[in-house]
Amino acid sequence: MPKQSFLPAVVSMALLLAEATLAGSPARADKLTLTRDGQPASALVLPDDPSPAAKQAAAILRDHVRAISGALLPVMREKDLNDVRAEGGKLISNERHLPETLVLVGEGRLTALLGLNSDGLGPGGICLETFPNALALFGSDAKTPNDPWGTLYATITLLEEPLGCRYLWPGALGKVIPKQATITVADLHIRRTPRILQRRIRNSHYSDRLQVGLDRLGFSRADYERAFRDAIRTDPALPDWFQWQRLGGKLNLNAGHAFGSYWKDYGREHPDWFAMQPNGSRDQSLAPDRCRFCVTNTELIDEIARRKLAQLEADPSANSVSICPNDGGRLTFCMCDRCKKLDPPEGRKIQLAYCYSTGGKTRQERFEYVSLTDRMVTFFNAIAERVTRVRPDALLVTYAYSAYSAPPLHVKLHPNIVVGFVPMSYANDTARANALRDWDAWSHAASKIYYRPNCLLAGYRIGTLLVYAQKMGEDLRYLAGHGMIGTDFDSCVHNWATQGLNYYVTARMLWNPEADPTELVDDYCQAGFGPAAGPICQYFQQIEELTNQIARNEWRVEAPYSPETVDRLQRLLDAADKAAAGNDDVLKRIAWLRQGLKFTDSQAQAYRLLEDPSGTDRAVARRLLDTRYEMMRNIFEKDHLAVNVACTVFKEGGTWKRLGWNWTVPHDTPATRTPANKPTP
């Protein structure tokens, strides 16, 4: 990452993706003026029946122009300009004085007069064109219902470049709105459709699991929802971070684990439908909502196909159903002879585990086996064959995941099966290399493939600093060129001060997979930290190298953060503070990053105590963990999106019992707990 001379990545996008000027169009204006000296020099013009995207886009553009310049642009409808005609690419009226610049937001009569339309734009497609006295911003909108927000995307593209706005992370602090009384727009000619049809990053919210962490920290659901709502509030208010990044589009693929109720529905009458465990039992009661199947049982396959056809019949608009097996659980896959015959002995070696009850206790055993992909593809194909006899157009969605993540060796996929590819890791270089090779094989095996990774969850159990933006960007560019039609990332868990750069670069690459991830990071640093961009870029560069060390050496994610390393990173933030002296917004953003570093240091210190629990002074451990506990509560209340501490606490469970510390004992901190959650001695 360069330390200075940062090239705005959106400029690169425009240069890469701008099309040639429409044939026969007149020469464009060199520069259009939207505001002059804090006063309006333009008006926003909406079609008479604007799309929802156009209405929202006009409101967002108006609010942001006012925030930038202080000028409130008037808003008009095309019916107010019935007499306007086009001559030589200029909008002219003999009956009225037109504003210096007309900003046409949404496709309508005036864009047609200028020779523009959305024909040929796909879902989410955008068009930005300048004329001697007009700027056209529109998209495909309602013509492409799978992504009807093109006009909004076009407007955000304008706000980012040339107007210079950015949205680094949710909330007011992450919003960058440069101040300038006079706003001008140079020649723009951008016409493109997003290459990735579904650009999805799941946005984590409240859940029962999160409540476990909230209870341990002494907060309620209402506390969480209030803190989250306050943290994401911005002015101007819309859109949210995800929509600003132009995440959107739908593949209309119904995915997700599909058989949660089957043990309850069929276990008593048809125990033979379920997976035989290594001890001969088919009982699934240890994990009834995550049951495993005997995938060679034809009666089971017939029933699944019947239910999937009924599901399609119940929703005439649906053309896909999920056949994804259940995830996780305490039971393993079927070990009956018929199922095992489908597993090639030369398949990739894997580890399987299963639980069983004995003597009133539950025990777990692990054993080596081979990849189950061929057996699972045989199962998926059997369901697909039955469903497509009745519904030839139906798509059946499954995952390349778990014990069936390796590509199939001898079985071909039914053409109506869509694969969501899960494997990817940035905490393990070997796993990453395997995932890229497996993607190539799966992308050739499946007629349609999309990316459904868990890699944004890297380190979410502990919440510490991790940056793998460069690798992520490189991989997304590669996958987009090798069959990827969409994404469904699980998930953004809101560790913005420790892992937010990963979220940002991922979102930007989804909108434009041809972008350079290094330029995206440089632009993030320059836009958000201005005079301090140099040391901030070095800060992220060093964290990315530490993350690479984790991946190379298969270390725990907190392992690189020794006191010496933390001190070195702190000195970079100190240098950033010095460079940003007098710039309150930048200093606040640096303080935000510092909160993530302090949290990482606290986590690293705590986990180092676990290296030798028996040799650790319990009083020392208690003081450190009490201080850490209070830090978590302060982050929750004052820097809510810096780290999702409730998620981290949920994942930790009883980790600290080995040091004589647990969540249910009162701690020597000034924290005041709500009566409903106050722990007892």
Image: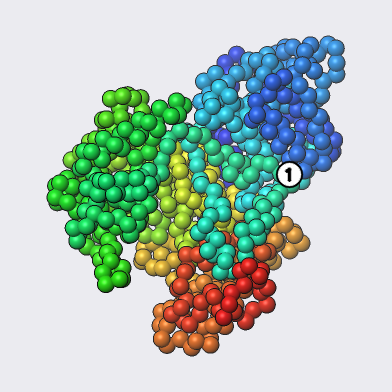
Which residue lies at the image location 35% right of the left edge and 35% below the top edge? 307
Q: How is the structure coloured here?
A: rainbow
Q: Which image quarter holds the C terminus? A: bottom right
**Residue type at the position of mark 1:** Pro
Q: Is residue 81 left or right of residue 443?
A: right
The x, y position of residue 315, in whole percent, is 45, 29
Q: Is residue 673 left or right of residue 604?
A: right
The x, y position of residue 486, in whole percent, is 44, 38
Foreground residue, 675 or 519? Answer: 675
Which residue lies at the image location 40% right of the left edge and 30% below the top edge? 312
Q: Is residue 132 left or right of residue 386?
A: right
The x, y position of residue 337, in whole percent, is 14, 50
Foreground residue, 267 or 288? Answer: 267
Q: 476 above or below 566?
A: above
The x, y position of residue 227, in whole percent, is 66, 58
The 10 Å Cα crowd at callout 1, few under 14, some 14 to 19, many 20 or more, is some
Q: Is residue 71 left or right of residue 247?
A: right
Q: 125 above or below 601?
A: above
Which residue lies at the image location 48% right of the left edge and 88% below the top edge? 617
Q: Say which residue label 1 marks.
A: 236
Can I make out residue 491 in this image?
yes
Can I make out residue 326 in this image?
no
Foreground residue, 354 or 624? Answer: 354
